[in-house]
Image (cartoon, coloured by chain):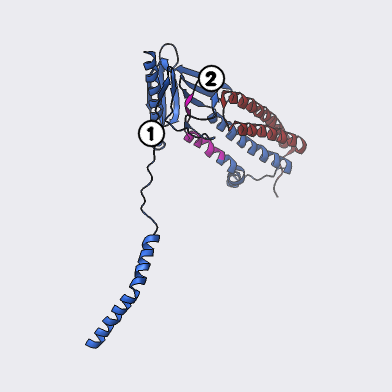
Amino acid sequence: MVNSVRSAFAIRKIFFLTHSRLLFAVFYSIFVWMPTIFVSPPKQVTPKTTVKKSSKKSFVASEEPSTPMHPLTAFAVNPHGLRFETQEEEEVVILFLRQHFIVNIPWIFLTIVLLLAPTVIFPKLFSVLSINFSLPAGYFLIGTLFWYLATFGFALASFIGWFFNIYIVTNERVVDIDFFYLLYKKFSEAELSKIQDISYTSGGIFAAIFNYGNVTIETAGEAPNLMFEVIPYPERVVETIRALTEQNEGDAV
Amino acid sequence: MIPVLPGALLLVIKIFFLVGLLLYSIFAAVLVRQEQLMADVLEESFEPILRLLVIGHLVMAIGIFVLAFFFL
């Protein structure tokens, strides 16, 4: 009995000694090749918009990296390759804004419904209402083409309406360009020196989640107040305009 | 047997399609003009693609109008 226990112990000892290097190699390789599960996410650096004075009556947001522009850009700092109507030669665009992309969700949803209607919704509706008739092939073809064309036109007009409603902050003024129903255009501007007060409101669940709000710019005299509606990062917009107006006042003194 | 719509109703549908497509083509032309006016306000790199889309939309509208003329 004792001998058998001793022999078993001896076998284990021999096994451990002979395989210790192998075991070490296995554990080491597991340790080295084990995928890193808990990696702290890289710190997201949100650059602050700093307005730097380059010369008298001239401002540049030089420390802010330029935001690359793409068709769906709703918030861009120091955008490149962008010019607007009545822009002067030495005028620099500091902020370029559109309404938050979330304002497009209703018409996108409606477009999807309209696209699905001829193939999914209408057949169901006709079967429920027991409507049963046949159209000649030509009528059916033209009707279907007209339906999809009108859907495309609706989506295109809605997108253009969003795309060209823009807000611009330059080193000299704040500009608001609005188009109504594609036929009416409204161009409003306020010089930085005439801005008296800037405030923003952001309320509701979606505004909190997607970080958008309305910025109100009150101007002196008869100049109308400007309202930037449903724009992303309203607090940064207010900060930037405030920094520009303070810089402007400093230069005036 | 599936009933075919009566001739008078088909005529009404035909007029609706033709007049509708004519008005729609005018709307598409207005959209092209408006896009040009808007593009004067804002010069951006994406603008040529948008112009291509609205012109394509106008061409499709005229094309379907012509098709309707022959098919209906």
Q: Position of residue A211 (x, y in %)?
A: 40, 34
| SS of the residue under disc 2 | loop
Q: Position of residue A14 (x, y in %)?
A: 31, 79
Q: Which mark is residue A204?
A: 1
Q: Which of pointers 1 and 2 lies earlier in the amino acid sequence?
A: 2
- Residue situated furthest top in the rendering: A221
Q: Position of residue A53 (x, y in %)?
A: 41, 22
Q: Which mark is residue A176?
A: none
The residue at the point 63 percent across, 35 percent down is A150
- Residue situated furthest right in the rendering: B70
Q: Which mark is residue A89?
A: 2
Is residue A92 covered in magenta?
Answer: yes
Magenta residues, start to end? A91-111
Chain letter of the blue region: A
- Residue situated furthest left in the rendering: A2
Closer to us: mark 1 or mark 2?
2
Q: Position of residue B14 (x, y in %)?
A: 72, 34
User: Is residue A192 something that shows in the picture?
Assistant: yes
Check the picture and name the quadrant holding the C terminus of chain B.
top right
User: Is residue A1 something that shows in the picture?
Assistant: no
